[in-house]
Amino acid sequence: MRALPRLSKYFGLLLMALVTSLATSIAQAADNDWVTLIDGVEGMENFNVIGDANWSAEFAAIQATAGSGASFLVSKNSYSDFSLRVEFWASEDSNSGIFMRCQDPSTITDRNCYEANIFDQRPDPSFGTGGIVHIAAIDEPRPTAGGKWNVYVLTLQGDHLVVELNNKKTVDVRDSQFASGPFALQWGRGALRFRKVAIKEL
């Protein structure tokens, strides 16, 4: 009779191991859905360059610090429903943004794409860092990105647009202007570094 408690304990441990293994497999499968496009200094080959900014691989990131006008790294693939995770560093005077579902990959603007802004010193701060230009304004106190590493998580599913900056939701809005297209990383002013960029299609 004493063997039964031991047997029960054995099956209990076996069940816990199976549950843990299943949870780990599910988590790994979810992680595998993410496609890394920039990882440190690797990834420029996944983008087309528009403009003449001095994009280079330095400081464990893809960076730009100068140019004669706005410049972009435009993804070679188009996306419709996705989550995009971007780790970036911006100088305090930087002007940048993440442009999504762009309609013309050769001409990127905040009128033919959704732009999640990176622009602490924007003259109209309501559409500054954390907002989607012309679509979703930011309430005070407004977030800033200058002088530090930040993480954007941008989720577009149908007409539902969600922006999270450093684990804080800054935009949750509906808009149906653009259904699909490539995304673009902008240099406009200051210093920008993109350390990791990954996308998961939904």
Image (cartoon, rainbow, N blue to C red):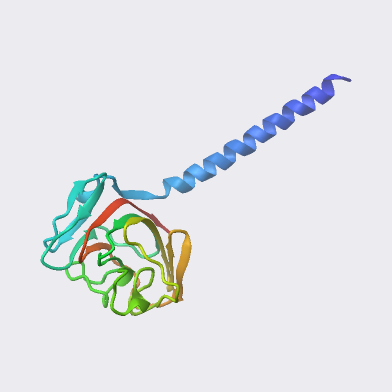
Q: Is residue 127 above or below residue 11?
A: below
Q: Residue at x 24, y 63 (%)?
A: 186
Question: Which residue appears farthest toward the top when viewing the image?
Answer: 2
Image quadrant containing the C terminus: bottom left
In the image, 128 versus 30, the foreground residue is 128
Return the x and y of residue 195 as percentages of the image width and height. Answer: 30, 50
In the image, 29 versus 44, the foreground residue is 44
For residue 76, side relative to residue 82 (left or right): left
Return the x and y of residue 100 as percentages of the image width and height. Answer: 31, 67
- Quarter of the image holding residue 13? top right
In the image, 35 versus 185, the foreground residue is 185
Q: Residue at x 36, y 73 (%)?
A: 132
- Total marks shown come to 0
Return the x and y of residue 104 as percentages of the image width and height. Answer: 21, 71
Image quadrant containing the N terminus: top right
- Quarter of the image holding residue 68? bottom left
Q: Residue at x 58, y 42 (%)?
A: 23
Return the x and y of residue 162 as percentages of the image width and height. Answer: 44, 68
For residue 176, side relative to residue 102 (left or right): right
- Quarter of the image holding residue 139? bottom left
For residue 156, side relative to residue 1 (left or right): left
Q: Residue at x 34, y 77 (%)?
A: 125
Q: Is residue 46 above or below residue 68?
A: above
In the image, 194 versus 142, the foreground residue is 142
